[in-house]
């Protein structure tokens, strides 16, 4: 991690020193740094909107874009996605220099304008997901359902979650075969037993 990045992290920790404003999640020479900043910004009608900004600084930062995540209990997913997209557009203008504090100030000053734009107001549409310059690697998630009454309903729900979160992968059913297969095999075994008894 470059000395300029260490200095930026130290300055950010000093600036966001209020309770629960700054949280360092991880920091290493090879993987970079991941931290969270809690701020408030002015919303559409002048109300204070709490924002949680999650930044991931890759090892090549500031020569490459940071990973950014925006979340708020007062905003829809589409509004958060639009705010993230606008933050990344602003970050592209600031490449090759420490930019996190500038991005935080920018979102505080411009959230009201971002929310008033037509694409932020369309919460019913699927959000657009900008591509970032960082690769988060391969993640494996295992969902174990102990008891399943309606397999197709569970499959539909899991597929919807995966689509909403932009996940790709496979659904695998381990253990007990499908109920119709199980019934057929049990009936087949019973029939063979009955044939042996009658012989």
Image (cartoon, rainbow, N blue to C red):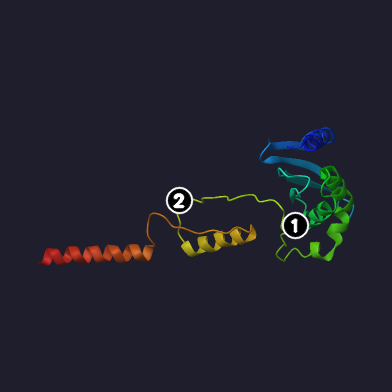
- 10 Å neighbourhood of mark 2: few (<14), some, or many (≥20)? few
Q: Which mark is residue 81?
A: 1
Relative to the observer, which residue lies in front, 55 or 114? 55
Secondary structure state at the residue bearing disc 2: loop
Q: Is residue 132 above or below residue 16?
A: below
* Residue 44 visible: no
According to the picture, the residue beneath numbered tag 2 turns out to be 146
Quarter of the image for residue 128 reads bottom right
Question: In the figure, is residue 133 to the left or right of 141?
Answer: right
The quadrant in which the C terminus is found is bottom left
Quarter of the image for residue 76 reads bottom right
Label 2, label 1: how many angstroms apart (C-alpha)? 34 Å
> Disc 2 or disc 1, which is closer to the eye?
1
Q: Residue 93's x, y, as percent? A: 85, 53
The earlier-in-sequence mark between 2 and 1 is 1
The residue depicted at 80 percent of the width and 61 percent of the height is 120
Relative to the observer, which residue lies in front, 131 or 49? 131
Secondary structure state at the residue bearing disc 1: helix
The residue depicted at 48 percent of the width and 50 percent of the height is 144
The residue depicted at 71 percent of the width and 58 percent of the height is 131
Q: Which mark is residue 24?
A: none
Q: How many numbered callouts?
A: 2
Q: Residue 186's x, y, as percent? A: 28, 62
Farthest left residue in view: 199
Q: Residue 1's x, y, as percent? A: 73, 37
């Amino acid at each position: 991690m470059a000395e300029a990045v260490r200095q930026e992290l130290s300055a950010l920790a000093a600036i966001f020193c209020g309770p629960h404003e700054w949280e360092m999640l991880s920091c290493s020479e090879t993987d970079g740094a991941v931290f969270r900043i809690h701020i408030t910004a002015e919303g559409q009608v002048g109300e204070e909107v709490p924002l949680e900004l999650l930044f991931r600084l890759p090892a090549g930062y500031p020569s490459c874009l940071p990973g950014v995540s925006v979340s708020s209990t007062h905003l829809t997913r589409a509004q958060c996605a639009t705010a993230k997209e606008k933050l990344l557009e602003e970050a592209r203008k600031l490449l090759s220099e420490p930019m996190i504090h500038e991005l935080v100030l920018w979102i505080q000053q411009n959230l009201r304008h971002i929310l008033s734009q037509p694409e932020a107001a369309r919460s019913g549409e699927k959000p657009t997901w900008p591509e970032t310059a960082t690769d988060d690697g391969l993640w494996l998630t295992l969902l174990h359902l102990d008891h399943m009454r309606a397999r197709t309903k569970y499959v539909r729900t899991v597929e919807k979650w995966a689509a909403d979160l932009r996940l790709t992968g496979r659904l695998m059913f381990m253990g007990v075969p499908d109920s119709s297969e199980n019934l057929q095999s049990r009936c087949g075994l019973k029939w063979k037993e009955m044939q042996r008894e009658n012989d």
